[in-house]
Image (cartoon, rainbow, N blue to C red):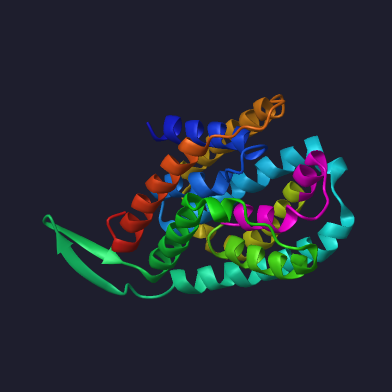
Amino acid sequence: MEYFFIAAVALIVSGLTLFSGFGLGTLLMPAMAIYFPIEIAITATAVVHLTNNIFKVALFGKHRQNRILLKFGLPAMALAFVGAWILTQLSGLEPLYSYSWLGKEMTVEAVKLVVSVLIFGFAMLDLLPRFRELKFASKYLPLGGAISGLMGGISGHQGALRSAFLANAGLTKEQFIGTGVTIACLVDVARLVIYSSHTAGMKIENIPLIVTGCIAAFLGAFIGKRLVEKVTMEQIQKLVAVMLIILSIGLGSGVI
């Protein structure tokens, strides 16, 4: 069942990421967190995210704008190292507290609490129309890259911020996609360098599940490339945001 679940999420979301504003990591990481410890879920998602973005770079990378990579991509990559390091430090902390609920012992961990707050925050922002229309002047690209990279390193949530800062960078649709996926690759490489020291907890039997996610994400990107019109699914985005809020509460409370 978990193979079907992970594959379905990876395929659908990967296809939509090209045009709709959905983030692959935003939905895939919580799905992974159902089956893995949170730090392993983030690492596994980063692997799928990177391989998927490499595929997208092969499709759209020729349209990237190097001036944006310098202004936005380099700060994003640098702060991704910092964010990933913060995650590894949080994962090594002792549980904050424990409590009993419905006869079960629930444990609240620092890393889950921080990640749940980030998921909750980004999901709430996604429910606000004003945030979805938020755009920043191009002079703030380095700051946007730093913030996006930091959030990407901690939890993988970087797409929404990146889009908001690149929206006024004077890019065509193809340049926006090509530049965005190239930046995402830089962030993924940076955070995986740090995460790699914690992948010892990833059991061999979990590898097929991750590979399944990678293949499904490839297929989703391949199908998505053939979409001509921009996919706009406001109602579905709101539903997903509500589901993410519920999941974030589960993570933060120790239920998940």
As drawn, 156 above or below 206: below
Q: Toward the viewer: 83 or 234?
A: 234
For this view, does 193 lie left or right of residue 242?
right
Who's the residue at 55% across and 55% down the image?
130
- Taking the image as shown, residue 224 lies to the left or right of residue 168, namely left
Name which residue lies at 76% across and 65% down.
141
Split into 4 quadrants, where in the image is the C terminus?
A: bottom left
Is residue 35 visible in this depiction of the protein?
Answer: no
Dominant secondary structure of the residues highlighted in magenta in the image = helix
Magenta-highlighted residues: 157-179
Q: Depth check: give the residue in front, 12 or 135.
A: 135
The single residue placed furthest to the left in the displayed view is 103
Position of residue 228 measured from the top left corner of the image (x, y, whole percent): 72, 25
Whether residue 219 appears in this view of the structure is yes
Q: Is residue 37 above or below residue 51?
A: below
What residue do we see at 74% from left, 49% from top?
A: 180
Q: Judge whether residue 174 is colored magenta.
A: yes
Percent from the top left, x then y, of residue 254? 29, 61
Is 209 on the left or on the right of 144, as rendered? left
Magenta span includes 132: no
At 74% from the left edge and 55% from the top edge, which residue is drawn? 166
Q: Position of residue 36 (x, y in %)?
A: 41, 51
